[in-house]
Amino acid sequence: MSGGVSKIRVLAVDDHPIVRQGIAGLVGIQADMVLVGEASNGRDAIQQFRMHQPDVTLMDLQMPEMNGLDALLAIRGEFPDAKVIVLTTYAGDAQILRALKAGAQAYLLKNTLHKELLETIRTVHAGKKTLSPEVSYQVAEHATDDTLTPAEIAVLRLIAAGNANKQIADQLSITEETVKSRVKCILSKLGANDRTHAAVIGLKRGIIEL
């Protein structure tokens, strides 16, 4: 751009047209930003990113065809310097940690959009990481928890799908005793009262998905 500061080029990725319209409207009236592209799923996001190579990408996590986390991993694999802000309606801390580990610079809940979104785009563009207060709380609240092992997550996933211990043992080719001991560890680590409560916590925190 001649004579002025170049604008922050933004890509909006969300499967809800109304959210993309909201972002487009918000970004469109900022003197220092321009929306260069929109995508409605992860696969589309990767193509749009390749085409526009935006400064900052706003990425929804839950999308059809390919979710935001997989798209984030693919984009960061191809463009290691990509700056991505993850947007979600979901404050599950396991999801947050997964997105941050995958290279997201920021994580915003959709209910905190507008002013916070614009500030976050500018902060991330300047090369800093940022988390909204609720998200920081979610991460901090569980940072010291014993994380579930992959074996325990496999059991929790089958509990959430409604399987009894014997069915879980059969499906994972382990003994019922092993299932019981894993269930005991899961309840203790999640602070759950029973199996159903553990499944609810696991889903709420994004440790498992149905």
Image: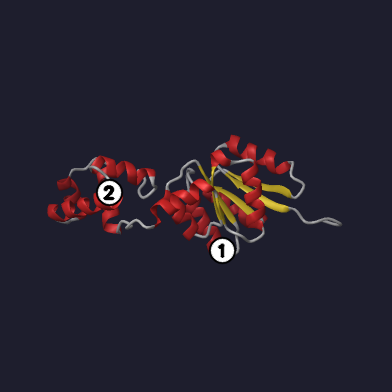
Residue topped by disc 1: 78
What's under tag 2, amino acid-wise?
Leu
| Residue 48 in view (yes/no) | no
Rendering quarter of residue 97: bottom left
Q: Is 198 placed left or right of 206 in the picture?
A: left
Front residue (pair 116, 110)? 116
Tell me the quarter of the image containing the C terminus: top left
Q: Residue at x 39, y 47 (%)?
A: 206
Looking at the image, residue 69 lies above or below residue 164: below
Q: Is 94 placed left or right of 84 in the picture?
A: left
Q: Is 189 placed left or right of 16 in the picture?
A: left
What's under tag 1, amino acid-wise?
Glu
Residue topped by disc 2: 156
Element type at marker 1? helix
Q: Position of residue 57 (x, y in %)?
A: 61, 52
Q: Residues within 10 Å of mark 2 (few under 14, many from 20)?
A: many
